[in-house]
Image (tube, grey):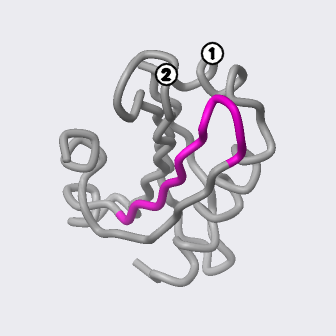
Amino acid sequence: MDRREAHGIISVELTRLRAETYQALVERLLDKQETFERIGASGTRYQVELEAFCDDKPHGNLLVIAAIDDGSWRAFVPMCDDFIRSPTALSSVSNVRCASVRERARA
């Protein structure tokens, strides 16, 4: 998997999500999962997964996670990036990590 290409794809998706309101993110992603495919400039097919979790309590901060893999062994350890959205203000903390979405949600 081309890490730069994959990171570029999830960066675009997270930029779109950052433009949404807190309420829109809750309705769209909380306790739900969106999965779709994107094709990179190299022709590689990537699976993208978007999810959101309440960071600490209901109506609290929302952790929005994007994960990407190319269907190879990376499907077991996808590249992830995320941000945290506060219900009252825009807050964005983001860092690329290599861990499964489920591991990140439990952390």
Which residue is pictured at 46% across the width and 28% down the height? 33
Q: Position of residue 18 (x, y in %)?
A: 72, 47
Tags 2 and 1 touching, CB below 8 Å: yes
- Left or right: 35 as drawn, with respect to 11: left
**Mark 2 closeness class: few <14, some 14–19, many ≥20 residues within 10 Å:** some
**Mark 1 closeness class: few <14, some 14–19, many ≥20 residues within 10 Å:** few
- Left or right: 40 as drawn, with respect to 7: right
Q: Which mark is residue 55?
A: none
Q: Position of residue 80 (x, y in %)?
A: 40, 60
Up-down relation of residue 55 to residue 70 (above or below): above
Q: Position of residue 95 (x, y in %)?
A: 46, 70
- Left or right: 5 as drawn, with respect to 99: right
At numbered mark 2, what does the secondary structure look like: helix, strand or loop?
loop
Q: Can you tell which quarter of the image residue 29 is in?
A: top right
Residue identified by numbered label 1:
27
Quarter of the image with the N terminus is bottom left
What segment carries the magenta color?
Answer: 79-90
- The residue nearer to you, when weighing 69 against 98, is 98
Residue identified by numbered label 2:
30
